[in-house]
Amino acid sequence: MEVEAKKRAWLDLLTTKAGNSSGTNDYIEKKKAVFRHLNKRVKEVVERKKQERTDKNDRRISDNFQSNIKMFWKLVRTAREHSKQPMMNAIRDENGYILNDEVLSLKRWKEYFKSVFMSEEKTCVLSIVEIPKEEKRGSEISIDEIMKAMKSMKAGMTAGYDRVSLEMLRAVEEVVAGLLHTLLNLCWELKRVPVDWCKAVIVPVYKGKGSQQDCKNYRGISLLSIVGKLYA
C-alpha cells in the first residue's frame, strides 16, 4: 500500500537524520527523494479514489431518476448536505476551456441552464386565451385541506430555496397548521405568493455517460419550495 510505504519512508528519513547531524549528504537527499515520490503517489491515489466514489454516486443518482424516484431524491439530498460545491469545479466553458474558478463555474452553469430552459419554453405551445377564467372564487382553504395535502405529499422530497423540508413541517404540523392556514389564505385572497416560492435551486445531475466536464451531460433538477407545492 502506498500509504504504508510513505509512512516507512518518513520514519526512515527521520531515523537517518537523527543519526547524521549534518543532514546534508547524498544518502539523506535520496531518502527525501523517495519520500517525495511516495507522497506524490499517495495524493494521486487519494484523488483517484475520490473521483471513483464521485462517479459511482453520480451513476446511482442517474440510474434512480427513472426507476426509484424516492431513492433519487434521497441521494440528491445527501449530495447537497455533504458537499459544499457539488459538481461545480473543473467544468468547461462553451469554448472547451476548463474553469477551475468557482465564480466562473457558477456563471457557466447559470448560462447553460438559462439557455436550456429558454429553449424548452420556445417548444412549449400554450394558448392562454383558451383557458377559461374563473368566474367565482371558492371558499377559503381549510386546515383539514392543508393537513390532507401535507400527508399526501411523498416523503423524502428535498427542500427548495427556502430550505423548509416536508419532514420539518410534519414534525410540527399541529403548531404550523394554523400559520399555514393564515399564509395560504392570504396568498389566495391577494392572488400573490412569496418570491421564494417562485425560485428554484437547480441541481446538476450527471446523466451517467459522457465527459463530466461538459454541462450538456447533466440534467438540471429544479428543487421548489415545499410550502409552495403545498399551496399549488
Image (cartoon, rainbow, N blue to C red):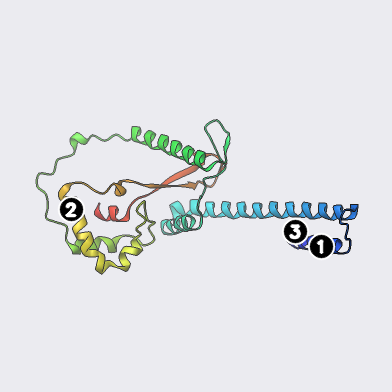
Q: Quarter of the image holding residue 31?
A: bottom right
Residue 51 % position (x, y): 61, 51
| N-terminal-most mark, 2 or 1 | 1
Label 3 SS: helix
Measured in 3D between alpha carbons, the distance from the residue under mark 2 to the one under mark 1, in whole angstroms, is 72 Å
What residue do we see at 19% from left, 34% from top? 129
The single residue placed furthest to the top in the displayed view is 95
Residue 215 % position (x, y): 50, 39
- For the residues bearing labels 2 and 1, Cβ distance under 8 angstroms: no
| Residue 186 marker | 2
Label 1 SS: helix
* Residue of label 1: 14
| N-terminal-most mark, 3 or 2 | 3
* Residue of label 3: 2
- Relative to 128, is 104 on the left or the right? right
Q: Nearer the viewer, mark 2 or mark 1?
A: 1
